[in-house]
Image: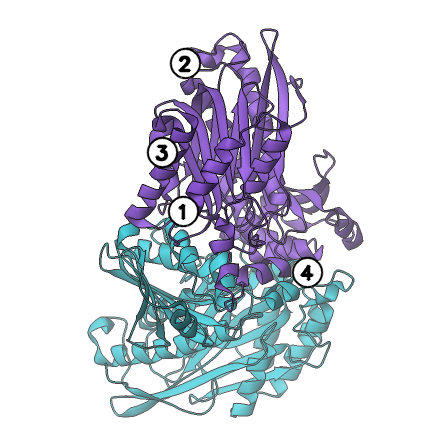
Chain colours: A cyan, B purple
Amino acid sequence: MKTLFKSIVGSINAPRGFKSSGVFCDVKKLGTGKGSNKGNKRDLALIFSELPASVAGMFTTNQICAAPVKVCVQRVANGRAQAVVVNSGNANACTGKQGMKDALAMCRVTATHLGISEELVLVGSTGRIGLPMPMTNIRSGITKAAGLLDPHSDSAANVAEAIMTSDTRPKEIAVELKLGGKPVRIGGICKGAGMIQPGMSPTGARPASLPLHATMLGFITTDAAIAPKALQAALTEAVAGSFNCITVDGDMSTNDTVLVLANGLANNKLITASGYRANPDFKKFQAALTHVCLELAKMIVRDGEGVHRVVKVIVEGAHSIEDADHAARAVANSALVKTSWHGGDPNWGRIIDALGYSNAKIVEESVDIGYSASGGKRILWSLKQGQPTATTFARLCKAVAPTEFDLRIRLNLGTASKFIYAADLTEEYVDYNKGDVTDPASLGG
Amino acid sequence: MKTLFKSIVGSINAPRGFKSSGVFCDVKKLGTGKGSNKGNKRDLALIFSELPASVAGMFTTNQICAAPVKVCVQRVANGRAQAVVVNSGNANACTGKQGMKDALAMCRVTATHLGISEELVLVGSTGRIGLPMPMTNIRSGITKAAGLLDPHSDSAANVAEAIMTSDTRPKEIAVELKLGGKPVRIGGICKGAGMIQPGMSPTGARPASLPLHATMLGFITTDAAIAPKALQAALTEAVAGSFNCITVDGDMSTNDTVLVLANGLANNKLITASGYRANPDFKKFQAALTHVCLELAKMIVRDGEGVHRVVKVIVEGAHSIEDADHAARAVANSALVKTSWHGGDPNWGRIIDALGYSNAKIVEESVDIGYSASGGKRILWSLKQGQPTATTFARLCKAVAPTEFDLRIRLNLGTASKFIYAADLTEEYVDYNKGDVTDPASLGG
């Protein structure tokens, strides 16, 4: 498909009618990971739409699910939202009844300050699991943030900073497309950078068909006019091909959340709930939203904890889509494969070993393994039909030397395919995550 | 059960009628991992029984399975064997038809030297995947080894050394029990130390019920008189509770193999194939064999690549045995949990997160997490019913400070339980496995 959208400056404030703010309230200081620099990083943010918006969401399928996720699942089902309050430094996970009260209080306080119904406020949290929310700080942070709501890109950048934990940099994107001649904008921000192998669904319930596995948080705004049902369909498909196709360390979080708010201020012809699949405007919107999600997802892997190399694991020719997923994830999460990537070692033995122990059907004599440049079409084969090719070790080393490359696996047993953006495993990852027990406040989520 | 066996000196040569030898033939020099010190570590071994013995085996369920494993699966089915030839430095995996020819040639050359039928010879290999077997070296090694066969414990120690790859020390054990008044001995050796999460079955076929996942090799000898069928039953149960309950890095190898030879020279009353389950001698033998396997399996984890801490993950109260297995493996293989162990961080948030994304049924409000001293009964609870206890952080840190401790998880949803011996994830593991591409011979399997 011809690209039907263009990149524009900014992120969540780029669409019409959105304001945001990111402030300091010392939650990180009180108990987050090393991402904290004790009071001088933003840790609370508000996103606000001038009008109530259509809303859609995708949520962790982890059975241990944080209070803010539970609140969002319920409220997104209503189809309307107008604001999001989010904090970093504390995940409000495994915090029992008090955690649920605190998540609801965050919405209520926000609603009061904004003069809207509390049912229209969503909430997100990320940080250490199991600590009570420091509600005094949170309340003062919300008050501060409400007073600073602003439509400029600087404020959106502050939000992108306020949701960071172990991330080393904020993650922002915005695009513009035309629907019926009207310019429509989509903006997004997200955060990683550890406990990253999201497997999200619209309700947090785990689909039986696929084995789904940071906290990752993603917040997307758009001024498109689109009904909640169509928006949810677009988001579900976009996340399936983006945030649900990444892994840093194979650990699915208790808090993974992606929200999208669509306020309709672009004045395009409403994409209605009935018949949206056949609507060309829906298809254009879907493509642009998928692009936004995929670019954000890739930023998460590139900025993953200790990550030096990002590898797109592409499995083709699998017997079924489930098999393609099993095969890609087995390779993407193998400690031995990940350390070989770190070392720049084109070790196909570890790759075929991981394929062999995956739950995918594999036939040794059918497996091809090769490499291409990131996004490239030309494949340098290392293994064909289960046997090493004549390609020299030096050439293979060159293929895996870049900081990003594509690993091409063909099982030659069917037509199903799957890609996963994966990361290498480095000494820095271990060092970061082992923490320092002499300083409990330094211990990550 | 009262302990019905005692530890004795030695390993595979301790039972009557067994001889062995371990020699240098420069296979490691030609292409193994860093365990190689280039020609001055033994890399080929023979194990020989004076009489044809009953035999049983357990083999990797990896769909990518090395040639020596395929040979053993076929021959163990015959129920009789008299010798084992084994090399380190080359796994003879993914080596195609030539690999199969080479594995069979190893047996044939060994049989010729020993003057026995080649059908009575088994073969094992460990080392780098995908390299052709250096058969000139292997042949000269077998000739050398056949000339040095010896019943003393020194020779058995040489075998334990010859099968090492990244292991830092040989692994040996022997016990003696009484069957009908006759002293019966069981001896064993094994090797790890990376690509370790064995999931072995008697035929290499994967059971549908359990998700199974180093190369680990284990060789056990006994002078017990026991029919092959009973011996296989004893080994299957012993491995299920030992080698199949360990993980170093979550990677199941292409070569995992455990073999046991029983030559009957103890002259105990034969444990026959019919009715063995009710035979008290079988039960005694089973208990002793399980002890041998478990002690060897623990040695593998303790000597795992870069391992500082060994944690016995004990899951109790699961809804089903499959759930208990899923839950224990999710925790045991979580990069975040493993790095927290390395750091001495009693981080229950990462543990409950891993439980939540496992395929086991989990109810947050029912989960208890605690620690006990290795093998201890007293549990220091960190989490009860999904909520942190009043136990201080300092006390929890003390509980996870030893080099070995037990992690106690109670799901409180049923009666099924499972334990897994797991390892921490350290910078040394990463450094070792990233290898050095400027020296391909240094790259591990």
Q: Which residue is mark 3?
A: B108
**Chain under callout 2:** B
**Chain under callout 1:** B
Residue B280 vertical position relative to residue B197 in the rendered view, above or below? above
Q: Quadrant of the C terminus of chain A?
A: bottom right
Say which element carries label 1: helix
Labels 2, 4: front one: 2
* Mark 2 and mark 4 on one chain: no
Kindly identify the residue that appears in the image at 53 percent across and 78 percent down: A116
What type is the residue that disc 1 sits on? Thr
Residue A149 vertical position relative to residue B293 in the rendered view, above or below? below
Q: Which residue is mark 4?
A: A131
Labels 3, 1: front one: 1
Mark 3 / mark 1, whichever is N-terminal: 3
Mark 2 / mark 1, whichever is N-terminal: 1
* Mark 2 and mark 3 on one chain: yes
Left/right placement of residue B443 relative to residue B205 reads right
Q: Pointer 4 and pointer 3: residues touching (CB < 8 Å)?
A: no
Labels 4, 1: front one: 1
From the top left corner, tell me how far across and down residue A356 is, in percent.
37, 49
From the top left corner, tell me how far across and down residue A313 is, in percent.
38, 66
Q: Which residue is mark 1?
A: B136
* Mark 2 and mark 1 on one chain: yes
Mark 2 / mark 3, whichever is N-terminal: 3
Alpha carbon distance from label 2 to label 3: 30 Å
Labels 4, 3: front one: 3
Residue A295 vertical position relative to residue A208 in the rendered view, above or below? below
